[in-house]
Amino acid sequence: MTIFSGRHFGSVSVAEIAAAAGAHPNQITYYFGSKDALFVHAAFLMLLRDAERLKPVGHRQRTPRAFREAMARTALALPAVPIAVQAMSITRHRPELQPLAQHDLDLLFRLAERYLTAVLERHDWVIDRPALVEARTFWSAVLGARLISESGFGGRSSDIDLAGVLTVRTR
């Protein structure tokens, strides 16, 4: 994905991607079908990898408020979030790639649900809605905050009270 850093997605060719990977261009299209599919696949793999960074941050927190704030701050700063937003934008125009994005989003939500459930049990905290809904709401807000901030809105993603989206509290 570093080949896309600082460049518009459309300006990167399959040949450049193949050269960076030490592969032939036809291997990219054979295994992924297209540059778009490769980008969507890689973007969500990066997001899933980056989401793992939240675990140690959350485990260190001793209060629900500190947990909510640390999770929000860290999630908004993940490098893969804007790339995932761009990948979702691609799937809007490439419906055949939507199942890939849906699968990876479902995986992100399920992993977040498991992590949240473990944190709640560890600290004896509670939430106001099912853990899967909490996880989906959190990640939807993260992705939406980045989309808003990158689409020309005068604010920043940190202007959104992402911590307020989480309902984690003591019993």
Image: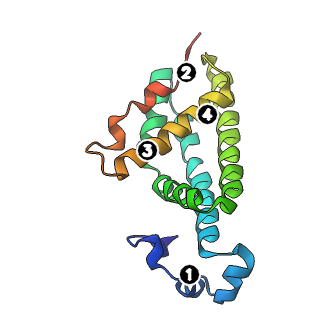
Residue at which label 2 appears: 168
The mark lying in front, picked from 2 and 4, is 4
Whole-number angstrom distance, CA of label 3 to CA of label 4: 15 Å
Q: Is residue 153 above or below residue 135?
A: below
The mark lying in front, picked from 3 and 1, is 1
Residue at which label 4 appears: 135
- The earlier-in-sequence mark between 3 and 4 is 3
Identify the mark at residue 17; answer none if there is no mark.
1
Whole-number angstrom distance, CA of label 3 to CA of label 1: 27 Å
Whole-number angstrom distance, CA of label 2 to CA of label 3: 18 Å
- The earlier-in-sequence mark between 2 and 4 is 4
Residue 109 in picture, x, y percent from top left: 66, 40
Instruction: Inspect this view and state whether residue 67 appears.
Output: yes
- The earlier-in-sequence mark between 2 and 1 is 1
Labels 2 and 4 touching (C-beta < 8 A): no
Give the quadrant of residue 120: top right
- The earlier-in-sequence mark between 4 and 1 is 1
Tag 2, which secondary structure? loop
The mark lying in front, picked from 2 and 1, is 1
Labels 2 and 3 touching (C-beta < 8 A): no
Q: Amino acid at mark 1?
A: Ile
Image check: 113 left or right of 71?
Answer: right
Whole-number angstrom distance, CA of label 4 to CA of label 1: 33 Å
Q: Amino acid at mark 2?
A: Val
